[in-house]
Image (tube, helix red, strand yellow):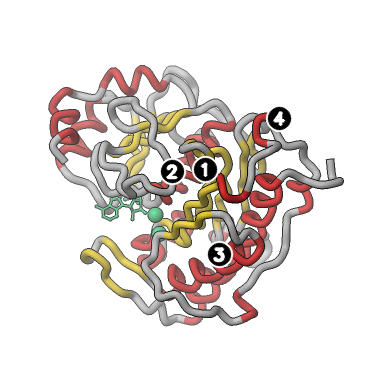
Amino acid sequence: MSGNPAVVMRLVASAYSVAEKAGAIVRKVLHSGDLGIVEKTGANDLQTLADRLAQKSICASLSRRFPKVTIIGEEDLPCEEVQEDMIENGQAEEILQKSCPKEYEALKEEELVVWVDPLDGTKEYTEGLLDNVTVLIGIAYGGRAIAGVINQPFYNYQLGSGAALGRTMWGVLGLGAFGFQLQEVPADKRIVTTTRSHSNKTVTDCVNAMEPHNVIRVGGAGNKIIQLIEGKASAYVFASPGCKKWDTCGPEAILHAVGGKLTDMFGNPYHYNADVKHMNSAGVLATLRNHDYYVSRVPQSVLQALRSD
Ligand code: AMP
Ligand code: MG
Ligand code: MG
């Protein structure tokens, strides 16, 4: 199917190449040694030069090729021309070659919403926990996350110079997800992954209520979804506001494409229309399997706390 690929497949193919360029920018800023850190709402909500440059590159590149798509990025940046060398024109050939799922063949540019987290795990980026960092691009239609791209700029960085640095994962609902080996934690093991830098009592109460055999505390929403699909964790549990639509849209699409599920702590789905509230106020609960078990373990006190936010 390489004749005239559907708009959504062309958009995913562009998002793949654009996310790789953004990943290269994220690496370059780190190597420059000057991160240009700014506090947004506080010391646990940071923005660096890499967040700013990566978002400019992603948004300018995608909007040039897809002018009618609504693009919503995390960073609040002034509208200005970007330099030509910030534009990525490539489209991943491997994606253009795949058949578009029937239900998305006729989608138009103006019906699509793109959610961009140019650098997820900024806190960890500034602390040198580099494999926690991802670039996230999610594509929504009719309020649902239908496609996503995750670039992990520092994948393999601990292996040294011989190993290829960075990787890109992508997925489309109804087609599947690619760029990684799908693995599951054994069904009788509950390994919970949660935040390392945005914890509070409700967050830890909820993690404990899952009766986990093991708890992993790492940065990044994208990174935690990668742990689910690569068999490192059984559930991503974050019973707090803080995560936003750009954190979850892309990762959710990839997780759903392999049969997993991402909801709030009540078990309700999030919506990704252009006009939704950005905050995922009722927390994030994501699993590859056994979602109902984890929803059933969320204590009433936790639900009560989230209801009042
Ligand atoms: P974490 O698991 O703490 O790395 O968070 C996943 C994503 O949600 C990251 O993009 C964080 O910046 C964001 N996030 C979670 N909690 C908060 C918070 N309290 N304030 C700002 N951002 C948050
Ligand atoms: Mg983020
Ligand atoms: Mg970010």
Quadrant of the drawing holding the C terminus: top left
What residue is shown at x 63% (from left), y 37% (from top)?
A: 177
SS type, badge 1: strand
Q: Amino acid at mark 2?
A: Asn
Q: What residue would you read off at disc 3?
A: 58
What whole-number distance in Å separates the C-alpha atoms at marks 4 and 2? 21 Å
SS type, badge 4: helix
Residue 34, compared with residue 240, is above or below; it is below
Q: Residues within 10 Å of mark 2 (few under 14, many from 20)?
A: many
Q: What residue would you read off at disc 4?
A: 102
Mark 2 vs mark 3: give the one in front. 2
Q: Amino acid at mark 1?
A: Ala
Q: What residue would you read off at disc 1?
A: 140
What whole-number distance in Å separates the C-alpha atoms at marks 1 and 2? 7 Å
SS type, badge 2: loop
What residue is shown at x 43% (from left), y 42% (from top)?
A: 272
Q: Amino acid at mark 4?
A: Lys
Residue 45: x and y in percent read: 28, 62
**Is the CB atom of the residue marked by disc 4 within 8 angstroms of ligand 2's nearest atom?**
no
Q: Earlier in the sequence, mark 3 or mark 1?
A: 3
What whole-number distance in Å separates the C-alpha atoms at marks 2 and 3? 20 Å
Residue 105, compared with residue 126, is above or below; it is above
Residue 172: x and y in percent read: 62, 38
Q: Earlier in the sequence, mark 4 or mark 3?
A: 3
Residue 169: x and y in percent read: 61, 47
Looking at the picture, tell me which residue is in the foreground, 198 or 115.
115
Mark 1–mark 2 contact, CB under 8 Å? yes
Q: Earlier in the sequence, mark 4 or mark 2?
A: 4
